[in-house]
Amino acid sequence: MTTAITAPTLSGAPPASGIGGKLRWFISDTLTITRRNLLALTRIPEALFFSTVQPIMFVLLFRYVFGGAINTPGTDYVNYLMPGIFVQTVAFGAVSTSIGLAEDLQKGLIERFRALPMARSAVLTGRTTADLVRNVFVVIIMTAVGFAVGFRPTTGVLPYLGGILLILLFAYSLSWGFAVIGLSAANSETAQVMSFPLLFPLTFISSAFVPVDKMPSWLQGFATYQPVSVTVSACRALMIGGPTASWVIQSVAWTIGFLVILIPLAVHRYRTRT
Amino acid sequence: MPYAIEVEHIKKTFKGKREVRALDGVSFSVEEGTVFGLLGPNGSGKTTAVRILTTILQPDSGSARVLGHDVCKKAGLVRSLIGLAGQYAAVDENLTGRENLVMVGNLNHLNKAVVGGRAKDLLEQFNLADAGDRPLKTYSGGMRRRLDLAAALVARPTVLFLDEPTTGLDPQSRNDLWEVIESLVGGGTTVLLTTQYLEEADRLASTLAVLDHGHVIADGTPAEMKADLGATVLEVGLSNLEDARRTGAVLDTLGPHSPMVNGTVVEVTVDNGPQAAMLGLRALDREGIVPTAFTLREPSLDDVFLSLTGHSTVEEAHAQEDEGSSRRARRLRAAEEALPVATGELS
């Protein structure tokens, strides 16, 4: 503590000028924040649990416990289940976007970011990008687990990868919605509490785990056409066959719609949050 | 001498369930290369002033310049010239000390080759070299504050803002941090620091402003402030309220201000401690009053407040706790709980 502190003479780089300079800073700042969030992810045991162990438990639960009682005409339940559980898992994972942002706000980290000469929106893009990377990791694990419990896609590698891509894009758009929630919550607990009432109907009143036609008729409309179901149906068609185009278009439309509405909303929330 | 920081008639009101006027026409200026202390209890507006000067918040009216640049119109430029270390140790818990410093360096857009070396130097200078590759979860409160300060210095800022840098620290860590700040100032940095402790302001700052309810109620050098106040506080404890009342009357002419009678304790600020003690004891003896306690002590921030405003800092903190959002209020409360006798303990 007694060593002299170097005399400050040189400040940081001057602010970026021009579109090119600003874009370079935006990309570099996004990568910095993404890296930071991914590093943190590997060091929070709960986060690792939620992104790896929990999805595996869901697969095993539905495959071996509930699955026997669920009748899916025309296909094995495990083939029916896996696309659904993919979407359910990444949708649950999007909650971490809201919890992470709420925590950064709560701990005062965002205060520091705001006083740095960084691209302001990089806090949000870095967070959602990190969650996207985590989801890539999650779907790889789940693909492996799926195959281990008897999942056999019938359409080939390319449509399978197309389905995965669709899921990742959909999850990315959800992340922006949960970013809005995280930026509106007083703390991370509230963020979590605010997220689940939204998430449960979307993931469980859906075609993810059971065929919709066994539900009461008043529920079937919502359960068929809400965004999670549409994405599950598109994914199922891409992975195990069936009419594809209409579901894929609907899913992509939801994804684009979410992004168009939620990105500006999240950015606005971030700028005005004091 | 040019000014590093100029603040003119800044006003800021937080709207919400209850409107809080955090700053109500605040002006001050800080000369380059000096330490300026912004002194006041919780909720007086110190943090709001820092947040405006560091471009985090926009004022409702008035203007502020850092090194001549308007903090609203040239926010980007200002951010590249300043460093901020906060009361709430805004560092990432899940990263190591080194990773935190590298992250801040990258977000300052320093040359990638420079950042690693900068982080290493700072860890050494702040006595964190051994802990540099451990996650922050394992750090003590004092280590966290040092890292927070180091993070504020990564880009070698010309102007440094320290928002209650030592609140919640034990005396040893506080002393360590003071030494670091003094060493920095020796290097020519301009520092604005907020504090609740008169002792801290006295030790570090060359000029001070005292904030209360969003107003600057006094400013000057610490010496001027103390001279104004009386250098010493004479505290007399009595066995009953009647004796306390009589003591207040007896000691009325002892100092520049009238004594404060608070229950069975009488406090009077005096210029010459030993002489006042002697006179005071004689006067009490003449009246046949026997004190249960009789102490001379340095004035605390609470004394400054009592003499300037006639009210104590403690009630202040409670009345103003909900400044800003509920998140801030909770953090303020947490800080207060960590230091239950915050304003009185440095007597």
Image: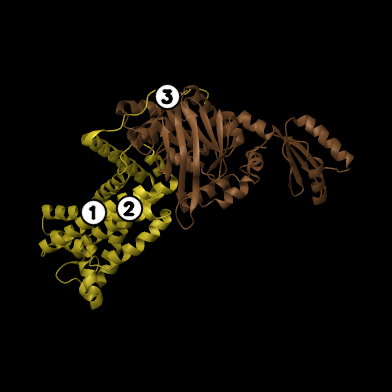
Chain colours: A yellow, B brown
For mark 1, name the chain.
A
In this picture, residue A82 sits left or right of residue A269: left
Q: Determine which residue is flagged by label 2.
A: A179
Q: Residue at x 30, y 57 (%)?
A: A55
Q: Are marks 3 and 1 in contact (CB under 8 Å)?
A: no
Q: Are marks 2 and 3 in contact (CB under 8 Å)?
A: no
Q: Closer to the observer: label 2 or label 3?
A: 3
Q: Quadrant of residue B114?
A: top left
Between the C-alphas of marks 3 and 1, the distance is 43 Å
The x, y position of residue B75, in whole percent, is 35, 37
The x, y position of residue A210, in whole percent, is 24, 69
One can see residue B149 in this view: no
The three-letter amino acid code for the residue at tag 1 is Leu
The three-letter amino acid code for the residue at tag 3 is Pro
Q: Determine which residue is flagged by label 1.
A: A259
Between the C-alphas of marks 2 and 3, the distance is 37 Å
Q: Residues within 10 Å of mark 1 (few under 14, many from 20)?
A: many
The three-letter amino acid code for the residue at tag 2 is Ala
First in residue order: circle 2 vs circle 1 = 2
Q: Residue at x 34, y 41 (%)?
A: A36
Q: Nearer the viewer, residue B297 or B285?
A: B285
Q: Determine which residue is flagged by label 3.
A: A8
Q: Nearer the viewer, residue B242 or B176?
A: B242
Q: Residues within 10 Å of mark 3 (few under 14, many from 20)?
A: some
Q: Quadrant of residue A82?
A: bottom left
In this picture, residue A11 sits left or right of residue B176: left
Which part of the image, by quadrant, shows the C terminus of chain B?
top right
